[in-house]
């Protein structure tokens, strides 16, 4: 799951950066926000729970 | 009688004439000044001023300063020192020439800027003391030596790595910079072609070991200033990973941050890299704008701290088996608050110093930047104290200190682009945000951060970057352009939504690329060196097992949770 988390984090960056190719500023804004959200999701919802699965306080 | 009457009249005329002349002499300067002031409006023809006469070397020959004899008497009023006598003459036979005068003006501008940048850099260096006090005070007494030593040595490890290669990667292609004399030796940026055939600068290639052509006075000033910024980022991680980080792993991790992680993002934002070119390449406002480093310094440190904290895990006893967090209060709140004040003082170097000069190119905005810095720190502590008082019934001291720092972190990126009202709002919101973030990271994510560094620097750093895209008011003018785009930086609230797009891309790069890079790098270090100390060392406190000496050897340490003294074996 850690690898999946990393991939999702990078995917979010690619989405945000791809917004530069779009013509309209409002659309760019929405796509950039989506990319930011996907990267955050990768950290908070995938990578971090993968680490906490074997956390010291669970043992 | 007649003769005496004539004599009387004559004397009266003479007296009146002398009086009139005296009065006229008194009024002449005022009349002359009035005439000069009024003449352009009174007579349009007078507006046609004569063509300027070019100044020549001959005109300067008559200019003389105080004599050596006069100077030998001393100058208590300061009126004789700093005259034509002090202008450096290139050829004593020719005497003072126009070229000498012009060169002196140019050198004075650069000297002003050198002094400004160096002195503010010294202030930023002193922030290391503030960080050391805040982090050590927020940790338990049994880890005082270890925490203080990490803050102490991060300066050396980071500096060395930055001198070897970090500076070159970050600033190796940043020329030209008119404030510091051009910085022309830093003229090589490695770039690739990306979306739409545009050049994307990735890293600089000049300045390794500060050798070769970068053995240059301007480059040295730039190095010192950028180095202390990098060290600020590096020391953020030590707080989040405190009380369980192996010292050897910390050393390697700090070198990695100083050599690669920080310089890469620094290049993209400040060294002529792709983020700064989003404006010229894709018309996204003025490109990514981060005046003094909410993103480059604080968020880089914050996301790196998150990566390391996730890898090494929580301290023993921080969470119960059901995931409920336990409080682990620091041992010295007075040290924490004094440290916060030292940091706030150092921030006057951080933000106003980021103009890289005081003279020319709109640099007099340093006054506005300093006031913005002051205000945001103030409203940051307001925001935090309001949140804590409302939610928990007491004005928590450590979170109030973190609120001050959160406001300062958040204003770091926008300090050069916003007005005082914007600064106050940004700071206040950061003060509230840091409290919410600390709760979220501790209770929801269950990431252990003893000092709140991830929230203060990571969360509020990202907020600072975004706030440029909201609050930049178009009032700044740094030589008429920023990042190669003419005009002043404006955010969404002042008519340019595209600036916000550039800022969001910058934030996503921080959590998408910089976090990932830090996570992968520190995972490798974990695999090779091992990031976490043994459980026995952690329970004993890291001072003896890791450092070989206690922070407080003459004190008996009492554990609040155990209600008894902690036994520490000295052998």
Image (cartoon, grey):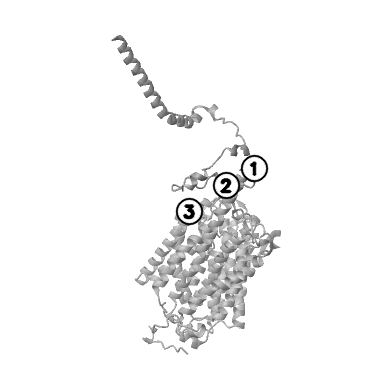
Disc 1/disc 3 C-alpha distance (Å)? 45 Å
The tally of labels here is: 3
Classed neighbour count for the residue bearing mark 3: other residues with Cα under 10 Å, few (<14), some (14–19), many (≥20): some
Report the disc number at residue B94.
1
Residue B132's spot in the image, x, y percent?
A: 47, 72
Q: Nearer the viewer, residue B376 or B361?
A: B361
Q: Mark 1 Cα within 10 Å, few/some/many (few <14, many 20+)? A: few
Quarter of image, res B55: top right
Nearest to N terminus: mark 3 or mark 2: 2
Indicate the secondary structure of the residue bearing disc 2: loop
Residue A8 appears left or right of B440:
right
Residue B181 visible here: yes
Disc 1 on helix, strand or loop?
loop
Q: Is residue B37 above or below residue B153?
A: above
Closest to the camera, between mark 3 and mark 2, is: 2
In the picture, the quarter occupied by the N terminus of chain B is: top left
Q: Residues under labels 2 and 1: Cα distance? A: 14 Å
Of labels 2 and 1, earlier in sequence is 2
Residue named by callout 2: B87
């Amino acid at each position: 799951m850690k690898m999946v988390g990393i991939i999702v984090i990078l995917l979010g960056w690619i989405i945000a950066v791809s917004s530069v190719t779009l013509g309209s500023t409002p659309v760019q804004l929405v796509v950039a926000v989506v990319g930011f959200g996907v990267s955050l999701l990768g950290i908070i919802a995938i990578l971090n729970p993968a680490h906490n699965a074997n956390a010291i306080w669970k043992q | 009688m007649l003769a005496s009457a004539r004599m009387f009249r004559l004397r009266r005329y003479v007296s009146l004439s002398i009086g009139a002349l005296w009065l006229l002499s008194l009024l002449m300067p005022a009349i002359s000044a009035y005439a000069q002031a009024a003449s352009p409006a009174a007579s349009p023809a007078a507006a046609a001023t004569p063509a300027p006469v070019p100044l020549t070397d001959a005109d300067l020959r008559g200019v003389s300063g105080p004599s050596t004899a006069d100077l030998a008497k001393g100058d208590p009023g300061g009126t004789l020192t700093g005259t034509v006598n002090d202008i450096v003459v290139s050829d004593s036979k020719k005497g003072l020439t126009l070229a000498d005068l012009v060169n002196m003006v140019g050198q004075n501008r650069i000297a002003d800027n050198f002094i400004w940048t160096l002195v503010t850099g010294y202030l930023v260096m002193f922030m290391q003391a503030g960080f050391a006090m805040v982090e050590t005070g927020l940790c338990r007494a049994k880890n005082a030596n270890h925490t203080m030593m990490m803050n102490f040595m991060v300066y050396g490890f980071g500096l060395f790595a930055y001198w070897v290669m970090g500076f070159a990667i970050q600033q190796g292609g940043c020329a030209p910079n008119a404030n510091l004399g051009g910085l022309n030796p830093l003229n090589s940026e490695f770039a690739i072609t990306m979306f739409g055939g545009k050049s994307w600068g990735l890293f600089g290639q000049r300045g390794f070991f500060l050798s070769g052509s970068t053995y240059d006075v301007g480059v040295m000033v730039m190095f010192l200033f950028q180095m202390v910024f990098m060290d600020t980022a590096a020391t953020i991680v030590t707080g989040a990973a405190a009380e369980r980080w192996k010292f050897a792993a910390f050393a390697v991790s700090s070198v990695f941050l100083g050599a690669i992680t920080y310089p890469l993002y620094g290049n993209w934002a400040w060294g002529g890299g792709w983020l700064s070119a989003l404006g010229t390449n894709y018309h996204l406002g003025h490109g990514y704008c981060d005046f003094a480093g909410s993103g480059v310094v604080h968020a880089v440190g914050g996301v790196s701290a998150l990566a390391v904290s996730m890898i090494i895990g929580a301290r023993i006893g921080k969470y119960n088996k059901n995931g409920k967090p336990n409080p682990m209060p620091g041992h010295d709140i007075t040290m924490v608050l004094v440290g916060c004040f030292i940091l706030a003082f150092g921030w006057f170097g951080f933000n106003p110093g980021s103009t890289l000069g005081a003279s020319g190119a709109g640099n007099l905005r340093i006054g506005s930047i300093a006031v913005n810095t002051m205000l945001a720190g103030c409203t940051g502590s307001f925001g935090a104290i309001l949140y804590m008082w409302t939610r928990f019934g007491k004005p928590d001291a450590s979170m109030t200190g973190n609120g001050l720092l959160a406001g300062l972190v958040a204003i770091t990126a926008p300090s050069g682009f916003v007005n005082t009202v914007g600064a106050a709002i940004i700071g206040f919101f950061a003060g509230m945000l840091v409290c919410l973030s600390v709760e979220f990271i501790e209770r929801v994510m269950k990431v252990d951060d003893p000092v709140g560094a991830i929230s203060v620097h990571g969360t509020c750093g990202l907020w600072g970057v975004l706030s440029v895209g909201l609050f930049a008011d178009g009032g700044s003018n740094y030589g008429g352009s920023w990042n190669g785009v003419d005009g002043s930086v404006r955010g969404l609230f002042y008519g340019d939504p595209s600036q916000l797009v550039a800022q969001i891309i910058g934030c996503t790069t921080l959590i998408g690329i910089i976090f990932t890079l830090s996570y992968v790098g520190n995972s490798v270090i974990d695999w090779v060196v091992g990031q976490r100390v043994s459980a026995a060392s952690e329970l004993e406190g890291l001072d003896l097992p890791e450092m070989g000496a206690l922070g407080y050897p003459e004190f008996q340490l009492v554990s609040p949770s155990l209600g008894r003294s902690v036994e520490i074996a000295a052998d």
